[in-house]
Image (tube, coloured by chain):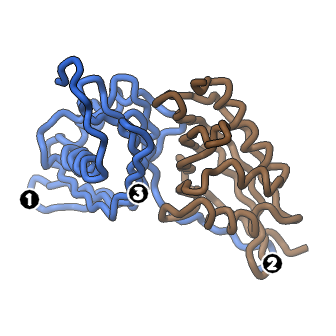
Chain colours: A brown, B blue
Amino acid sequence: MNISPDEIRAQVNKFWDFYSRKSKTEFSEMYLASATVFAIDSRRMELARLMLVRRERELLGPASSVAAKLGPIDVQFLGADLAVASYPVHLSITRVLPGGRIYQSEVPSGRVTQVFQRSLEGIPRILHEHMSSAEPVTVKELPRT
Amino acid sequence: MLSCGEVMESISPEDVRAEVRRYWAILSGKLKDKLEEMYSPAAIVFTGKGKRSEPAKLIAVRRSRQSHGAGYTSRVELDSIEVQIVGPDVAIAAFTYSYHTDKIGADGAQVRLDSLLGRATQIFQRDEAGVLRIVHEHLSATVPPEVQPAAGK
């Protein structure tokens, strides 16, 4: 069965729902094993599984939070089992670094590209992701609790 | 153009890398090919500073005008280009790059206008004629975040 726009939009919404609810297992299952990622704050591309370790440590802990307001999601089809989702996003992030420092950042002009490919189980999963900000991001250090 | 019944060759990573290098050679004025022809008619693009994606044809015309403007020179250095072949006719190229723009003044002096480190995702798909074209592009700057220290520090 060909991928549909609604299926891709539903996967994008699930992605942010799992992220903001810190559902670690479901969140990591959004990615294919070979997936690659440009994270919003990294200089280089990395394997999703390495990025997931860092996100889990910094963004999915008890004192961390991620809130996202998504703009309209464009879907481009590249084949029966391949599609690209791209959309703007406003992110509010509280991140706890190793050592306990806490940082808060607002990313009002975030942009996301996610390439989805249907997995062997028939579920569209992320094969490549590029997150960025159209403007420099200001990060505020918060007092430790 | 492929004739009816002709089998399209699968994409090789080197084909994709060659197209990426051609793209940047056009953008930096080293090649006179048309940038808009690198894109599929339906391609969409996130530029380095655009808050929303835009149709590639608009961006290509704007970039060509900038890169071929009198008195401007630009230079790009590409880091290693990672290529994922994700289907018989689709490939994803991802890489980082540095891009420098200089202006040459009336006295001949060269002034550095801009220099940025960027990250790029370019998704290529073969069209009906077998030509690799960009269907989606996401460019972003790698600007480290400005950190404001905690109150009382």
Say few, some or many: other residues with alpha carbon within 10 Å of mark 3 (under 14 / 14 to 19 / 20 or more). Answer: some
Q: Tell me the SS state at disc 3.
A: strand
Name the residue located 28 percent from the left edge and 36 percent from the top edge: B132
What separation in Å lies between label 3 and label 2 (alpha carbons)? 30 Å
Q: Chain of mark 3?
A: B
Chain ID of residue with mark 2: A
For mark 1, what is the residue? B108
| Disc with the residue nearer the chain's start (1 vs 3) | 1
Residue lying at 40% horizontally and 29% vertically, measured from the top left: B43
Residue A37 seen by the camera: no
Task: Identify the residue at image location x=18%, y=33%.
Answer: B34
Q: Is residue A117 left or right of residue A59?
A: left
Horizontal side of residue A61 vs B70, given as left or right: right
Tell me the quadrant of the picture where the N terminus of chain B can be found. top left
Q: Which mark is residue A126?
A: none
- Same chain, labels 3 and 2: no
